[in-house]
Image (cartoon, helix red, strand yellow):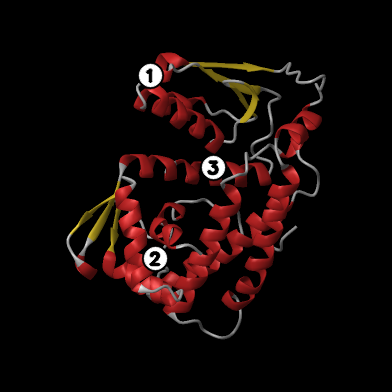
């Protein structure tokens, strides 16, 4: 758990983070006030947040770029669960994106390239990226916000050939680091299993214990999903560890949300609050 990730975890729906809440939760993770202050200072210096007020009464306001980067994550989580449950089968189309931004707009070029990677794109060659899912709305929005909408070219194809490879499964294995991503999900499963046992056990957990578990789980899910292009199951080896890991996460989150009825809602990663998790059941 990093201090930066903790700040992201506590962003409210209105884009703010209360310093009093941030310092209190940081203490639960053994983070010092100095760590928090230095992290906040870096985030403000980087333009990720603005700062209003002093001490524990201060309020952080997330910048538009910060919110934009975090916003699609709920959409991606929903897509992942739809894939896991067979509700989003692959239609056989590859989604291609190319861009040509002049050197005079280098910051926009770098930001657009980072957006492509964040959305799961793999480079085919200079300025040309491929994704297995429909990413066009996100790319159009990003290009428009960066002021380079005319620099982006989008298309789809069912006939992709790279280096002599044409089989979709072989292409997916060559373009994305599947084993590295799979190991990340195995780690998530190992983290989720004992926490699920605690959440569903007979011993009642305190509000602080629930909060720590919730942040740990959400932080780990975020860590492993950030590099995941969310390839359709048709392109992945079976069984895919991501399916089991996400089901364990869903069962934990269901148990946490049931704990809210007792008046102790875990306050974290509020953007996950709207996720439609599948019905809880034994992991497959």
* The C terminus, quarter of image: bottom right
Which image quadrant for residue 8?
bottom left
Q: In the image, is 143 to the left or to the right of 75?
A: left
Return the x and y of residue 4 as percentages of the image width and height. 42, 58
Neighbour class for label 2 at 10 Å: few (<14), some, many (≥20)?
Answer: many
Asked which secondary structure carries label 3, the reply is helix
Q: In front of the other: label 2 or label 1?
A: 1
Q: Residue 104 bears which disc, if any?
A: 1
Neighbour class for label 3 at 10 Å: few (<14), some, many (≥20)?
Answer: some
| As drawn, 127 above or below 15 | above
Name the residue nearer the viewer: 215 or 47: 47
Residue 246 seen in this snapshot? yes
Q: Residue 184 bears which disc, if any?
A: none
Circle 2 residue: 267
Q: Residue 76 bears which disc, if any?
A: 3
Asked which secondary structure carries label 2, the reply is loop
Asked which secondary structure carries label 1, the reply is helix
Which one is earlier in the sequence, the residue at label 1 or at label 3?
3
Q: How many numbered marks are there?
A: 3
Outermost front residue: 103
Residue 13 seen in this snapshot? no
């Amino acid at each position: 758990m990093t201090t930066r990730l903790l700040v992201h975890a506590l962003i409210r729906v209105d884009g703010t983070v209360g310093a009093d809440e941030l310092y209190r939760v940081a203490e639960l993770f053994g983070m010092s006030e100095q760590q928090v202050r230095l992290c906040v200072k870096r985030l403000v210096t980087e333009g990720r947040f603005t700062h209003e007020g002093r001490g524990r009464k201060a309020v952080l306001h997330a910048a538009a770029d910060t919110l934009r980067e975090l916003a699609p994550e709920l959409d991606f989580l929903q897509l992942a669960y739809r894939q896991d449950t067979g509700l989003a089968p692959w239609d056989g189309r590859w989604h291609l994106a190319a861009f040509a931004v002049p050197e005079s707009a280098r910051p926009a070029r770098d930001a657009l390239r980072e957006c492509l990677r964040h959305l799961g794109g793999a480079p085919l060659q200079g300025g040309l990226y491929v994704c297995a899912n429909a990413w066009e709305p996100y790319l159009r929005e990003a290009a428009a916000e960066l002021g380079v909408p005319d620099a982006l070219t989008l298309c789809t194809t069912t006939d992709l050939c790279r280096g002599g490879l044409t089989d979709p499964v072989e292409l997916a294995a060559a373009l994305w680091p599947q084993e590295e991503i799979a190991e990340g999900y195995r780690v998530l499963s190992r983290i989720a299993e004992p926490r699920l046992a605690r959440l569903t056990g007979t011993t009642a957990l305190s509000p602080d214990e629930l909060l720590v578990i919730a942040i740990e789980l959400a932080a780990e899910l975020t860590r492993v999903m950030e590099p995941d292009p969310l390839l359709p199951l048709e392109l992945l080896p079976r069984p895919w560890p991501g399916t089991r890991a996400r089901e364990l996460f869903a069962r934990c989150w269901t148990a946490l949300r049931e704990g809210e009825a007792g008046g102790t809602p875990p306050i974290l990663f509020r953007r996950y609050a709207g996720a439609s998790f599948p019905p809880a059941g034994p992991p497959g």
